[in-house]
């Protein structure tokens, strides 16, 4: 790991010195180069405010959950198809599903109890691993998404940085926080041409107030309207 910044907090920065783990990518998953550059610039801005920013050169501890995470939505969708009146009295017509939704419902219907248990087990193991990680860091900094916006006619981008990706290639940074119930927030960090780009900050369980206070202080120091366009 590499420390980006280790300077005292500047007067008026609004917060005590925070320990931030900057995670440029998860494992070998691709990230759009413009998003990567803006996220790294955000890490430097946080260091310039006096926070201790450490870069994780390799971060694969979320991979087991990421690989299994779509299963939860698939199983939930299959249950909803089988019990259409349980959650809402509004008409529910699965025949209106697009191809992707139909495939997800079918995958959920075919899923086994052991597959669902594996997901829950990996999520609990990740929860414990992250709890130990948060003993050394206050926040995790990642891109909010791995890809820039894609055509509305597509359910997901099929390529990121020249590499083929699956349906959740763009959302690789989002699932782990949901899986273990950690507070997370997306902050604006600049523009890739006309497109706004954001970063994600994740805090330990129960640290919602600290996360919101940090996010507010950072936005006050770096109003989004002043970010440069790449």
Image (cartoon, rainbow, N blue to C red):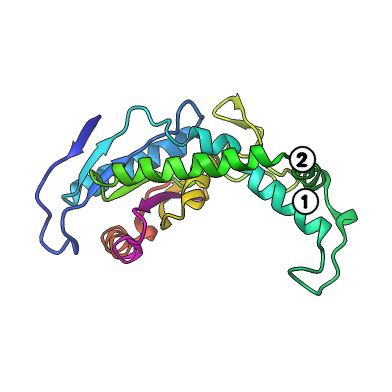
Residue annotated with mark 2: 107
- Could you tell me if the residues under marks 2 and 1 are in contact, i.e. CB atoms within 8 Å? yes
The residue stretch that appears in magenta: 196-212
- Outermost residue on the bottom side: it is 89
**209 inside magenta stretch:** yes
Left or right for 221, reference 183: left
Q: Is residue 61 visible?
A: yes
At 81% from the left and 43% from the top, the residue drawn is: 106
SS assignment at label 1: helix
**218 inside magenta stretch:** no
The quarter holding residue 203 reads bottom left
Residue annotated with mark 1: 78
Viewer-nearest residue: 174 or 77:
77
At 20% from the left and 35% from the top, the residue drawn is: 3
Q: Earlier in the sequence, mark 2 or mark 1?
A: 1
The image position of residue 226, as x and y in percent, is 35, 57
Q: Is residue 170 visible?
A: no
The image position of residue 56, as x and y in percent, is 31, 32
Left or right for 94, reference 69: right
Within 10 Å of the Cα at label 2, are there few (<14), some (14-19), or many (20+) other Cα atoms? some
Split into 4 quadrants, where in the image is the C terminus? top left
SS assignment at label 2: helix
Within 10 Å of the Cα at label 1, are there few (<14), some (14-19), or many (20+) other Cα atoms? many
At 16% from the left and 53% from the top, the residue drawn is: 17
The image position of residue 50, as x and y in percent, is 16, 50
The image position of residue 214, as x and y in percent, is 28, 60
| Mark 2 vs mark 1, CA separation in Å | 8 Å
At 61% from the left and 39% from the top, the residue drawn is: 168
């Amino acid at each position: 790991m590499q420390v980006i910044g280790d300077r005292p907090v500047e007067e008026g920065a609004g917060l005590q010195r925070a320990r931030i783990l900057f995670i440029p990518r998860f494992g070998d998953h691709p990230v759009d180069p413009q998003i990567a550059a803006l996220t790294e610039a955000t890490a430097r801005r946080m260091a310039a405010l006096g926070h201790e920013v450490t870069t994780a050169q390799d971060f694969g501890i979320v991979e087991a959950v990421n690989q299994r995470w779509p299963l939860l939505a698939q199983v939930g969708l299959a249950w909803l198809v089988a019990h259409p009146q349980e959650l809402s009295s509004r008409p529910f017509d699965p025949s209106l599903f697009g191809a992707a939704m139909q495939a997800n419902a079918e995958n959920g219907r075919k899923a086994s109890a052991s597959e669902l248990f594996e997901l829950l087990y990996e999520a609990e193991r990740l929860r414990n691993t992250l709890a130990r990680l948060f003993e050394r860091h206050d926040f995790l900094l990642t891109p909010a998404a791995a890809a820039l916006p894609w055509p509305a006619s597509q359910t997901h981008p099929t390529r990121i940085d020249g590499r083929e990706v699956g349906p959740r290639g763009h959302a690789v940074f989002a699932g782990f926080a949901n899986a273990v119930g950690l507070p997370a927030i997306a902050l604006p960090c600049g523009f890739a041409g006309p497109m706004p780009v954001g970063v994600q900050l994740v805090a330990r369980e129960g640290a919602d107030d600290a996360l919101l206070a940090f996010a507010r202080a950072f936005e006050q120091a770096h109003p989004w309207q002043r970010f440069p366009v790449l």
